[in-house]
Image (spheres, helix red, strand yellow):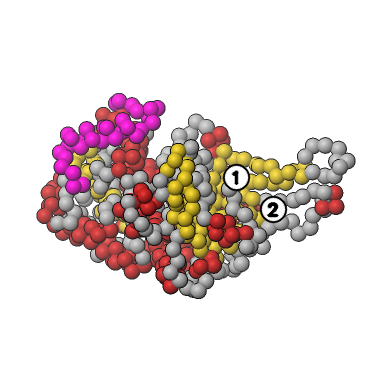
């Protein structure tokens, strides 16, 4: 792919938590490894009242706090901080944008904007940028979620962005797509011939996607109370993972071909009728309990008031196309769960006949596990014979074939997702970003679920913190003879 690096980066929300924990350390990492264009300047902006010097001090503190010890290099940090400058801005008002444009300077050499603001500020921000010449043909924009709370609001935001930025200059961010193991799904599927003949309804019994968190509200109470687990995790991260598992083979590894195939998957998701929603979805809200040996409060106690917002959701979904007809996709996410885990489990169908049954040998269907976090590995569970003379019968056992990313690629530095995504934004590669038609197809499916919840007055069931969610989530799979992959 032809790369077209810009000469300037404008970082909205530059004093926020995401910037401190992820964006500034990621940009430093790229700088330290010589991957940022020479002369690239980084302008931070937010409501906070900083000048260049105080913002550099702020950034230095963030790097000291959040960089791993082995990545701290005094010379590299000094060089990185010299790239930084700052201009305070109230994005709700047009008054501050001329000063921002003056600070950024000439953008004829290209400008990348990273926009991480409240959805209510999108329209005023885009118009402000456009009014001062920061939205022209040499400018591209990266958008951090949330991009709306339903299909209608998502369209409004996309329309506001499209007012100044056409689709080819718009980069919607889902940080899961920057994870190394997520990209390895493509290598696993389309770089190995032996999976393709069975990667369909003939060979796969079910697919499970789990994103489990042990944390509670932390500092996100205001956002999370209005969003809930379905909007916060399923609409973006989980559905993007589903698309990578379910998509047809793209012709090329580029932004158009890959996103074309993902969009087809989202359009093939079976929309839910209100009467079926209670039977194929489960919602929950964490109560008191213990996580990691520590007693924790319920969601309502953390929030300080009663709430009907779901902190857990489990869904039985279907992709209605030729490849996946009849294969259930079980999706699950929650806060205050038993362990922190993001993984995909693909259970293959059992062998059509067991020659070992008469000798006592019990078979389990093969399972492929793709673990995204906290560890990163790919594991294939296969059947093997236990050693022995078999006088009492043949004993078979499930054993793992492991590909540990850390072990196999020891010595290769593992980059966090934002490093890759920020570099792709700077260089102009849209492959790992989300296109408008994807987002809106995702929201259409999510809205059908929420409409069913409303029609049936469904309220989240309480579950103990430190558990795997409400018991109804277990019943959701066990009705089909399936067990969640919780080992």
Which type of secondary structure does the marked residue at label 2 adopt? loop
Taking depth in this image into account, of 281 and 128 the one nearest to the observer is: 281
Q: Which mark is residue 365?
A: 2
Which tag is nearer the camera, tag 1 or tag 2?
1
Question: Residue at point 47% right, 68% down?
Answer: 267
- Tell me which corner region of the image, top left, top right, bottom left or bottom right, holds residue 407: top right
- Tell me which corner region of the image, top left, top right, bottom left or bottom right, holds residue 95: bottom left
Q: Measuring from the top left, give residue 22's x and y in whole percent.
A: 34, 41
Q: Which mark is residue 240?
A: none
Question: Residue at point 16% right, 40% down?
Answer: 50
In this picture, residue 290 sits left or right of residue 197: left
Verify whether residue 305 appears in magenta.
Answer: no
Q: Looking at the picture, does residue 447 appear above or below residue 415? A: below
In this picture, residue 115 sits left or right of residue 377: left
Q: Measuring from the top left, give residue 31's x and y in whole percent.
A: 32, 35
- Tell me which corner region of the image, top left, top right, bottom left or bottom right, holds residue 56: top left
Name the residue carrying label 1.
Answer: 487
Q: Looking at the picture, does residue 280 appear above or below residue 52? A: below
Question: Residue at point 21% right, 49% down?
Answer: 107
In this picture, residue 413 sits left or right of residue 7: right
> Which contiguous range is marked in magenta?
46-75
Which type of secondary structure does the marked residue at label 1 adopt? loop
Q: Is residue 92 visible?
A: yes
Which residue lies most toward the top here?
Answer: 74
Q: Is residue 341 visible?
A: no
Verify whether residue 60 appears in magenta.
Answer: yes
Crowd rating for badge 2 (residues with CA inside 10 Å; few <14, some 14–19, many 20+): some
Taking depth in this image into account, of 397 and 10 the one nearest to the observer is: 397
Question: Residue at point 45% right, 34% down?
Answer: 413
- Which of the two labelled residues, at mark 1 and mark 2, occupies the earlier sequence position? 2
The CA distance from mark 1 to mark 2 is 16 Å
């Amino acid at each position: 792919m032809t790369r077209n690096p810009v000469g300037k980066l404008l970082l909205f929300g530059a004093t926020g938590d995401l910037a401190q924990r992820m964006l500034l350390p990621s940009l430093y990492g790229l700088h330290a490894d010589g991957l940022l264009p020479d002369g690239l300047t980084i302008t931070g902006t937010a409501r906070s009242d900083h000048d260049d010097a105080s913002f550099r001090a702020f950034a230095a503190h963030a790097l000291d706090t959040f960089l791993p010890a082995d990545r701290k290099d005094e010379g590299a940090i000094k060089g990185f901080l010299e790239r930084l400058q700052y201009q305070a801005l109230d994005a709700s008002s047009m008054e501050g944008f001329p000063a921002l444009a003056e600070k950024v300077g000439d953008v004829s050499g290209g400008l990348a904007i990273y926009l991480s603001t409240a959805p209510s500020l999108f329209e005023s921000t885009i118009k402000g940028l456009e009014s001062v010449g920061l939205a022209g043909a040499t400018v591209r924009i990266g958008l951090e979620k949330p991009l709306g709370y339903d299909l209608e609001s998502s369209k409004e935001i996309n329309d506001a962005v499209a007012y100044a930025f056409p689709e080819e200059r718009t980069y919607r961010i889902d940080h899961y797509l920057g994870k190394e193991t997520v990209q390895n799904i493509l290598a696993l599927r389309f770089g190995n011939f032996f999976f393709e003949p069975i990667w369909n309804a003939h060979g796969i019994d079910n697919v499970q996607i789990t994103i489990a968190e042990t944390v509670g509200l932390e500092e996100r109470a205001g956002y999370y109370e209005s969003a809930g687990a379905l909007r916060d995790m399923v609409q973006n991260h989980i559905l993007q993972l589903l698309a990578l598992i379910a998509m047809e083979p793209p012709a090329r590894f580029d932004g158009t071909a890959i996103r074309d195939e993902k969009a087809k998957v989202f359009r093939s998701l079976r929309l839910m009728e209100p009467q079926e929603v209670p039977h194929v979805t489960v919602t929950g809200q964490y109560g008191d309990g213990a996580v990691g040996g520590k007693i924790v409060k319920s969601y309502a106690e953390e929030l300080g008031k009663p709430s009907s917002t779901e902190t857990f959701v489990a869904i039985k979904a279907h992709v209605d196309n030729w490849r996946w007809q009849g294969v259930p996709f079980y999706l699950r996410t929650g806060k205050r769960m038993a362990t922190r885990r993001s993984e995909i489990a693909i259970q293959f169908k059992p062998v059509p006949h067991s020659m070992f049954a008469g000798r006592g040998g019990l078979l389990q269907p093969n399972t492929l596990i793709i673990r995204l976090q906290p560890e990163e590995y790919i594991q294939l569970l296969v059947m093997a014979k236990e050693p022995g003379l078999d006088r009492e019968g043949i004993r078979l056992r499930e054993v793992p074939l492991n590909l540990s990313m850390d072990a196999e690629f020891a010595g290769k530095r593992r980059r966090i997702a934002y490093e890759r995504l920020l570099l792709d934004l700077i260089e102009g590669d849209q492959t790992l970003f989300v296109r408008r038609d994807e987002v809106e197809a995702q929201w259409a499916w999510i809205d059908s679920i929420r409409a069913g919840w409303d029609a049936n007055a469904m309220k989240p069931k309480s579950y103990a913190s430190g558990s795997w969610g409400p018991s109804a989530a277990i019943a959701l799979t066990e009705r089909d003879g399936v067990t969640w992959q919780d080992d």
